[in-house]
Amino acid sequence: MSTPFYVSPQQAMADRAEYARKGIARGRSLVVLQFADGIVFVGENPSRALHKFSEIYDRIGFAAAGKYNEYENLRIGGVRYADLRGYTYDRDDVTARGLANVYAQTLGTIFSSAAEKPYEVELVVAEVGAGPEGDQIYRLPHDGSIVDEHGSVAVGGNAEQISSFLDQRHRDGMSLAEALKLAVQALSREANGNEREIPAERLEVAVLDRTRPQQRKFKRIVGRQLTRLLDADGAGATPTDAPSDTEEADTPEADTPATETPGTDTPASPTDGTTQE
């Protein structure tokens, strides 16, 4: 009888971590920044159907880099958790910290299980508070650990270089236009040090805006409003809720209860099922 092939637990975990990191690195990077009135999510995303950013609950947003079908399943699970907890107890009991703990348990269980491959995803869960001191941003790598972030965070393929760029330039009290421009500058930097232009139509931008009169603070920024913010000088930036040709407040995502999007149980991922977003 031949001797079974043995791999130490340390080596097995290292191999699984390397596998997950390579999968995440193939996806496009995204950044999450605090600004004076809330939190902005910015990422390069040419697809109009597959979103990197989504609303989870009233004040909570979700961002993900990596394999779309895997982080879409996690997003749906987060919406179900938030809806059930808010309905059973109180809407104020739904917090980013509680949601991050749920995601950490799920990712940690999958990562340590030898029966299935680790998820090739990296998540950001953010909650906007009544003031800047109440904002919360949590980053969750593939292994289920939780990192409490402040000011700015980047995830995806070029995250380390982007994070270093943001750490040097991000400051408290930035306007939305200033934060958006800084995020685009960071995403435009390539690994070799060169910069490239990212047109507005290739950007996906969303905000958690504490100044919105609605209970739900999540809003997408698109169309002319996004163009005006990118062209603004910072001091005279367009307010987040200013009307635009594609104002998100007219869509179900902005005015209806936080329920799952119909059909998201079978996300329209690409035919090969391996595209990184």
Image (cartoon, helix red, strand yellow):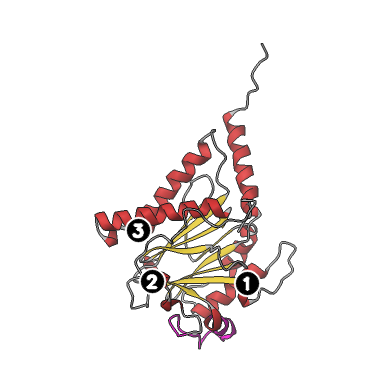
Amino acid at pointer 2: Lys
Magenta region, residue range: 226-243
Using the image as rendered, state which of residue 213 and residue 168 is in the foreground: 213
- Residue 156: image location, x then y, percent: 60, 57
The quadrant of the image that shows the C terminus is: bottom right
The residue wearing badge 3 is 95
Residue at 52% of width from left, 44% of height from top? 143
Q: Viewer-nearest of labels 2 and 1?
A: 1
Mark 1, residue position: 202
Closer to the N terminus: mark 3 or mark 2?
Answer: 3
Q: Residue furthest top?
A: 1
Considering only vertical position in the picture, is 139 above or below 170? above
Report, in whole angstroms, how far the alpha carbon at label 3 lies from the one at label 2: 14 Å
Three-letter code, disc 3: Thr
Q: Which residue is mark 2?
A: 217
Where residue 45 appears, x then y in whole percent?
60, 66
